[in-house]
Amino acid sequence: CSLISSSYNQQCMCFLLYCAGRGLKSHAYTHSVQFSHHVFLNLHTLKFYCLPDNYEIIDSSLEDITYVLKPTFTKKHIANLDKQGKLYRAYDGTTYLPGIVGLNNIKANDYANVVLQALSNVPPLRNYFLEEENYRTIKRPPGDIMFLLVQRFGELMRKLWNPRNFKAHVSPHEMLQAVVLCSKKNFQITKQGDAVDFLSWFVNALHGALGGTKKKPSIITKVFQGSMRIFSKKLPHPDLPAEEKEALLLNEEYQEKMSESTFLYLTLDLPTAPLYKDEKEQLIIPQVPLFNILGKFNGSTEKEYKTYKENFLKRFQLTQLPPYLIFCIKRFTKNNFFVEKNPTIVNFPITNVDLREYLTEEAQVTEKNTTYDLVANVVHDGKPSEGAYRIHVLHHKLQ
């Protein structure tokens, strides 16, 4: 795909080439004369022109091209997306299921692709972005570039769910260009990144770009936000004498404190992987049930957290569950020298995961729906520095 800049508004229909203007001194005019390519599409008005004669081409057969460039969805179409498992045939002859199509890995952007693909299969989020009217009128400060994320994500969502695609895969190039720009190059197309870091940044950036704040909701918080109680207790320095530790624990500073916090995803910690090998001199890969690592949120499991100067003992308990819950299993440990990956296998059911026992007593009474089915699962294969991400997604009609 060629780069699309805001100053380029004409596409040559012979080359994947974007040109500016239609006048005598424009790039489009020069290209039409130099290469005898005469049909151009205005990317803003979706009108076709013949250059250098500069007249509009009106032909119903060209509608397929404009629909691929800018797919549109009616409310009826959106409502039926999860009710049909029909295979569609792309113009190149391949068959595909809308919403479950590949995203091109341009160089090293699979870490972002899997997150974008997972989010595109969350029905309420998908439905919101399929209708551009839902966010077209959101007002942003002059010069704010963050809204570009919203626009590009909406465009990508509509292309992923387009039943009339030319090919059974979609390029995320324009979306990723917006990511590079808005993240100030913290996330790039040519350099592998961490999918969890990207997810955290992307959902928070989308929330802010949609006008959301801590008090004002957006579609992001409506779909993914839950809440929890955090019980935190400061610990004396481990090198202090026992008597001094006991004395400090009586001070108010070292008493347990409770706070309320919201979340867009829950981080689950894996047990430390064993260092010893089996009789075949191979490292043993442990397995753990999902509910074991969910014990972090039962309100009684305590874990020590260290900062630069202080240590704290914390425990967590959920007070509200979101409609869609994201688990991020912490596999990578980073320091100044290397990145280490924990290979522990997590076994989990794909339907009817009940989280009622992790709620406070009050929340157990008020929360009506506490069971979840798996919608998407992101996997990292290989070594931390050389591996790649892939994703499994649920097609609701075929489950």
Image (cartoon, helix red, strand yellow):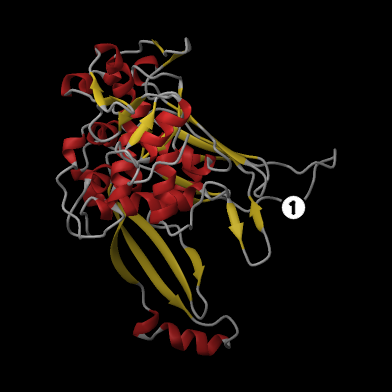
Front residue (pair 15, 223) = 15
Residue at mark 1: 275
Label 1 amino acid?
A: Leu
Residue 160 left/right relative to 385: left
Residue 36 falls in image quadrant = top left
Residue 354 falls in image quadrant = top left
Image spot of residue 6 (x, y percent): 33, 46
Question: Residue lying farthest right?
Answer: 280
At horizontal 29% and vertical 28% (from top left) the residue drawn is: 70
Quadrant in which the C terminus appears: top left
Residue 41 falls in image quadrant = top left
Front residue (pair 282, 93) = 93
Front residue (pair 143, 219) = 143
Front residue (pair 367, 195) = 195
Image spot of residue 262 (x, y percent): 29, 56
Image spot of residue 221 (x, y percent): 25, 48
Residue 217 left/right relative to 200: left
Residue 73 left/right relative to 86: left
Q: Can residue 91 be seen in the rendering of this structure? A: yes
Q: Secondary structure at mark 1?
A: loop
Q: Can residue 297 be seen in the rendering of this structure? A: no
Image spot of residue 391 (x, y percent): 50, 32
At horizontal 62% and vertical 43% (from top left) the residue drawn is: 344
Relative height, residue 268 to residue 162 (above, below): below
Local crowd size for mark 1, using a 10 Å CA cut-off: few (<14), some (14–19), many (≥20): few
Relative height, residue 72 to residue 150 (above, below): above
**How many marks overall?**
1
At horizontal 47% and vertical 38% (from top left) the residue drawn is: 113
